[in-house]
Protein backbone atom coordinates (compact mmCIF):
# COMPACT_ATOMS: atom_id res chain seq x y z
CA UNK A 1 0.00 0.00 0.00
CA UNK A 2 2.81 2.41 0.86
CA UNK A 3 4.41 1.70 -2.52
CA UNK A 4 1.13 2.61 -4.25
CA UNK A 5 0.87 5.85 -2.30
CA UNK A 6 4.46 6.80 -3.16
CA UNK A 7 3.83 6.01 -6.84
CA UNK A 8 0.67 8.12 -6.82
CA UNK A 9 2.44 11.07 -5.18
CA UNK A 10 5.30 10.91 -7.73
CA UNK A 11 2.82 10.69 -10.60
CA UNK A 12 0.88 13.64 -9.20
CA UNK A 13 4.04 15.78 -8.91
CA UNK A 14 4.89 15.14 -12.57
CA UNK A 15 1.30 15.88 -13.64
CA UNK A 16 1.25 19.08 -11.55
CA UNK A 17 4.30 20.33 -13.48
CA UNK A 18 2.48 19.81 -16.78
CA UNK A 19 -0.92 21.02 -15.59
CA UNK A 20 -0.06 23.96 -13.35
CA UNK A 21 -3.08 25.94 -12.08
CA UNK A 22 -0.90 29.05 -11.74
CA UNK A 23 -0.17 28.94 -15.50
CA UNK A 24 -3.73 28.01 -16.52
CA UNK A 25 -7.13 29.66 -16.68
CA UNK A 26 -9.71 28.79 -14.03
CA UNK A 27 -13.06 28.00 -15.66
CA UNK A 28 -15.15 26.96 -12.67
CA UNK A 29 -15.17 25.97 -9.03
CA UNK A 30 -17.37 23.78 -6.85
CA UNK A 31 -17.09 23.20 -3.12
CA UNK A 32 -18.94 21.70 -0.21
CA UNK A 33 -18.12 21.82 3.45
CA UNK A 34 -19.84 20.31 6.42
CA UNK A 35 -18.44 22.81 8.87
CA UNK A 36 -15.17 24.46 9.77
CA UNK A 37 -12.73 21.71 10.70
CA UNK A 38 -14.56 18.78 9.11
CA UNK A 39 -13.05 15.78 7.39
CA UNK A 40 -15.31 16.17 4.35
CA UNK A 41 -14.18 19.50 3.03
CA UNK A 42 -14.38 19.10 -0.76
CA UNK A 43 -13.44 21.49 -3.53
CA UNK A 44 -13.00 20.95 -7.24
CA UNK A 45 -11.61 23.50 -9.68
CA UNK A 46 -11.66 23.15 -13.47
CA UNK A 47 -8.81 24.69 -15.47
CA UNK A 48 -7.71 24.90 -19.10
CA UNK A 49 -4.09 25.32 -20.20
CA UNK A 50 -2.95 27.58 -23.04
CA UNK A 51 -2.61 24.38 -25.09
CA UNK A 52 -6.30 23.52 -24.55
CA UNK A 53 -5.78 20.73 -22.01
CA UNK A 54 -8.52 20.53 -19.36
CA UNK A 55 -7.93 19.36 -15.81
CA UNK A 56 -9.63 19.30 -12.42
CA UNK A 57 -7.82 19.88 -9.15
CA UNK A 58 -9.58 18.12 -6.28
CA UNK A 59 -8.80 19.22 -2.72
CA UNK A 60 -10.17 18.07 0.59
CA UNK A 61 -9.96 16.26 3.87
CA UNK A 62 -9.85 12.58 4.78
CA UNK A 63 -13.43 11.93 3.64
CA UNK A 64 -13.25 14.02 0.46
CA UNK A 65 -14.96 12.47 -2.54
CA UNK A 66 -11.83 12.44 -4.71
CA UNK A 67 -10.48 9.50 -2.69
CA UNK A 68 -12.96 7.32 -4.63
CA UNK A 69 -11.49 8.27 -8.02
CA UNK A 70 -9.62 5.55 -9.93
CA UNK A 71 -5.90 5.66 -9.18
CA UNK A 72 -6.21 7.48 -5.85
CA UNK A 73 -4.52 5.40 -3.17
CA UNK A 74 -4.17 7.99 -0.42
CA UNK A 75 -6.64 7.97 2.43
CA UNK A 76 -5.58 11.25 4.02
CA UNK A 77 -6.44 14.78 2.94
CA UNK A 78 -4.67 16.67 0.22
CA UNK A 79 -5.12 17.30 -3.46
CA UNK A 80 -5.36 15.31 -6.68
CA UNK A 81 -5.05 16.52 -10.27
CA UNK A 82 -6.85 14.70 -13.08
CA UNK A 83 -6.75 15.56 -16.77
CA UNK A 84 -10.19 15.41 -18.42
CA UNK A 85 -11.53 15.54 -21.96
CA UNK A 86 -13.66 18.44 -23.20
CA UNK A 87 -16.69 16.14 -22.88
CA UNK A 88 -15.86 15.46 -19.24
CA UNK A 89 -15.19 19.17 -18.62
CA UNK A 90 -18.60 20.13 -20.05
CA UNK A 91 -20.30 17.38 -18.02
CA UNK A 92 -18.51 18.61 -14.88
CA UNK A 93 -19.79 22.16 -15.52
CA UNK A 94 -23.33 20.87 -16.02
CA UNK A 95 -23.21 18.70 -12.87
CA UNK A 96 -21.75 21.44 -10.66
CA UNK A 97 -23.88 24.30 -11.97
CA UNK A 98 -21.01 26.23 -13.54
CA UNK A 99 -23.23 27.85 -16.16
CA UNK A 100 -20.93 30.85 -16.54
CA UNK A 101 -18.15 28.55 -17.74
CA UNK A 102 -20.52 26.88 -20.20
CA UNK A 103 -21.62 30.26 -21.60
CA UNK A 104 -18.29 32.04 -21.50
CA UNK A 105 -15.78 29.51 -22.83
CA UNK A 106 -15.95 29.35 -26.64
CA UNK A 107 -14.84 25.70 -27.05
CA UNK A 108 -17.70 24.67 -24.69
CA UNK A 109 -20.22 26.62 -26.76
CA UNK A 110 -19.01 24.93 -29.96
CA UNK A 111 -19.15 21.52 -28.28
CA UNK A 112 -22.66 22.14 -26.95
CA UNK A 113 -23.86 23.38 -30.35
CA UNK A 114 -22.49 20.30 -32.11
CA UNK A 115 -24.01 18.04 -29.46
CA UNK A 116 -27.47 19.63 -29.69
CA UNK A 117 -30.28 17.50 -31.17
CA UNK A 118 -30.99 18.40 -34.77
CA UNK A 119 -27.56 19.95 -35.26
CA UNK A 120 -26.41 19.59 -38.85
CA UNK A 121 -22.79 19.50 -37.70
CA UNK A 122 -21.19 16.11 -36.99
CA UNK A 123 -20.41 15.59 -33.33
Image (spheres, rainbow, N blue to C red):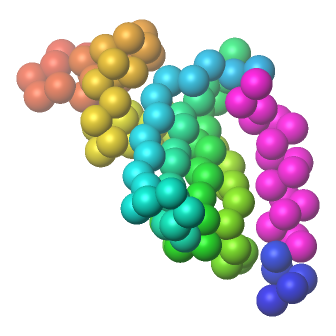
Q: Magenta part mainly helix, strand or loop?
A: helix
Instruction: Give the percent coordinates (x, y) of residue 115.
Output: 25, 28
Give the position of the C terminus as an image quadrant: top left
Let me know if residue 52 appears in the view: no
56 is higher (above) or lower (below) than 120: below
50 is higher (above) or lower (below) than 89: above
For residue 96: magenta? no
Look at the image and give the residue range highlighted in magenta.
6-22
The answer to which image quadrant residue 121 occupies is top left
Instruction: Give the percent coordinates (x, y) of residue 80.
Output: 68, 55
Residue located farthest toward the front when viewing the structure as drawn: 36
Residue located farthest toward the bottom when viewing the structure as drawn: 1
Instruction: Give the percent coordinates (x, y) of residue 43.
Output: 52, 48
Number of numbered markers: 0
The answer to which image quadrant residue 106 occupies is top left
Residue at 81% across, 42% down: 16
For residue 8: magenta? yes
Residue at 69% across, 22% down: 24
Residue at 82% across, 76% down: 5
Amino acid sequence: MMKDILYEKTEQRLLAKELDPAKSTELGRWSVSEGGMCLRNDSETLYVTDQGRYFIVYEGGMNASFHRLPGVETWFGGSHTREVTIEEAVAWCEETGNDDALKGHLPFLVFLFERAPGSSHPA
